[in-house]
Image (cartoon, coloured by chain):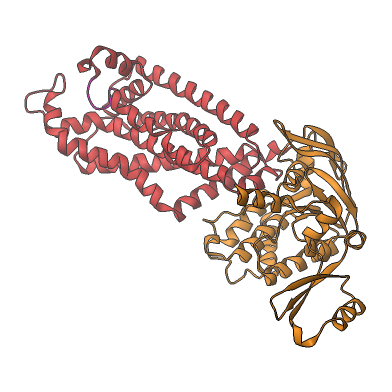
Chain colours: A red, B orange
Amino acid sequence: MSTTYAVRDSVTMLRRNLLHWVRYPSLAIMLVAQPILFLLLFVYVFGGTMGAGLPGAPTGADRTDYLEYITPGILIMAVASVALGTAISVAMDMTGGIIARFRTMDIAKVSVLTGHVLGAVLKSLVAVVVTLGFAVLLGYRSDASVGEWLAAFGLIVLLTFALTWLTVGMGLAADSVETASNTPMFLVLLPFISSGFVPTDEMPWGLRHFAENQPFTPMIDSLRALTSGHSPGNDLWLAIGWAVLIAALGYLWSRRLFTKVPAR
Amino acid sequence: MMEVSGLRKAYGDHTVLDGIDLTVPTGTVYALLGPNGAGKTTTVNICSTLLTADDGEVRVAGHDVRRESDAVRRTIGLTGQFSAIDELLTGRENLRLMADLAHLDRATAKASVDALLARLDLVDAADRRAQTYSGGMKRRLDLAMTLIARPRLIFLDEPTTGLDPRSRRELWSIVREQVADGVTVLLTTQYLEEADALADRVAVLDGGRLVAEGTPAELKRQVPGGHVQVEFTDGRSERLASDGSVASLRKILDGLDDSEVAGVTVETADLDDVFLALTGHPTTDATTEEKEVLA
């Protein structure tokens, strides 16, 4: 049975996936640069005013306070940005000739997709570390312990799995690479309508209702709590629940699309 | 090596395969000859586990392609019409990827990669990205990627379409070597010349049906040879039937006046002649083109 080779084939496909990043760095650079640009924009253009306007902010709060407030949201955006790249590379595979070759080989079928997923997790971690490095350069400091940071990274990895399986499905569903680069855009935009950049209390009723209940909000709130050394409380369970749900649905959707997509 | 019986496939109202039966003996080259849209690629896709048929049965080395697809996949290799190489990887990396997916051990993988690079004349380009390869090189790499797992049955879907004559001949000689090693080849082609050069048996496909089957010699006997095209100095031209033999050419030339003839061309039977002879209509390709011109 081909499943005996699932691990070996997944590692082979992961290697291919990472080689693509080395060979085609412009996409990678663009995807990592996106959250960093948002970070610079929000901290330097809006940061002064926004920092002073944060609820419970002491007088004299400034852009450094705002930097601390938005960094968790920006990190999540970095993960979403890499997930967008995954949709693109899956669609490139599926619209190219090589997929017919993979399908006629006796390999673990799932490895064609797990290569992308594992690659995305590694890339997300790189993107998150680079983005975090930028935030530190701009003055971001954390009071959290090593254990809390580990928990934060655990949450990021879980979120990466969730968003990646979702975008793998989008890549499979897309009939062209262009479509695959458009459909996941909402993932990069959704953090704006969450607790990521401003507290949801200030939003109009309908928007607030949406922002408070969409999956990114408990994720960002948990990450913010963990990285500032507080207990995330119930938000953490809500975040984990959302991530597991999205990952499971994304996986099932992807598997279904992958097994039924006909040859060209 | 492969038995196909009663194969049917339709997309909605459009019937692509309308009951195909084939037997491909082990260690031979079998050619599916036909124009675009005849059902060649669909047949290959079903036999190589990419598509499922609506009806009929395909057995490869005794295994049913639908129920025992893993066993079939261990036996076959496919070089499709669309380039199935990873353009971002080098030639060597592409082959290594295939060797790893074929679960070869490290030493065997390295030896096979080196041997295939040498055999397919890709050593100098081995560490360049496949993106930079010429059409002929890409096709050779594509074939090498198929060969690395040592398949017993190879599907070649229009392997030389778009290649220059030299690359085409190189590819033919590689196919012959494989067959000499006992490999079975199912080939699709639009070129009568290619089927003639490589195949032990040829099946002619038209509109999803087999219209003729036999050795190339048997098929050519059903085709009324070629013709001689004569251009006259006054601008007239005439098409004279000829079987290509010296006797028939001499007879034609004897009947011509030296001063009136501007040029003589001898044309051998081509796919259109085969189709005209076997189906009573030219290749569907030509028909579509005509329709497009009319529209």
Residue B152 at x, y = what percent?
81, 53
Point out the residue furthest to the left here: A59
Left or right, A71 with respect to B70, comes to: left
User: What is the quadrant of residue B7 in the picture?
Assistant: top right
Numbered marks: total? 0
Vertically, is A84 above or below B32? above
Q: Is residue A142 visible?
A: yes
Residue under the image location 23 percent in, 20 percent down:
A199
User: What is the quadrant of residue A38 in the picture?
Assistant: top left
Between B228 and B176, the one lying in front of the other is: B228
Vertically, is B278 above or below A252? below
Left or right, B149 with respect to A243, comes to: right
Between B188 and B127, the one lying in front of the other is: B188
Q: Is residue B104 visible?
A: no
Vertically, is A224 above or below B63? above
User: What is the quadrant of residue B239 in the picture?
Assistant: bottom right
Residue under the image location 53 percent in, 65 percent down:
B128
Between B181 and B78, the one lying in front of the other is: B78
Residue B182 at x, y = what percent?
86, 59
Residue A87 at x, y = what percent?
47, 38
Residue under the image location 83 percent in, 58 percent down:
B274
Left or right, A37 with respect to B97, comes to: left
Q: Is residue A107 magenta?
A: no
Point out the residue furthest to the bottom here: B259
Start-end of magenta stretch: A195-199
- Pick the quarter of the image with the N terminus of chain A: top right
Please tell me whether the stretch drawn in magenta is mainly helix, strand or loop.
Answer: loop
Residue B121 at x, y = what percent?
66, 70
- Pick the quarter of the image with the C terminus of chain A: top right
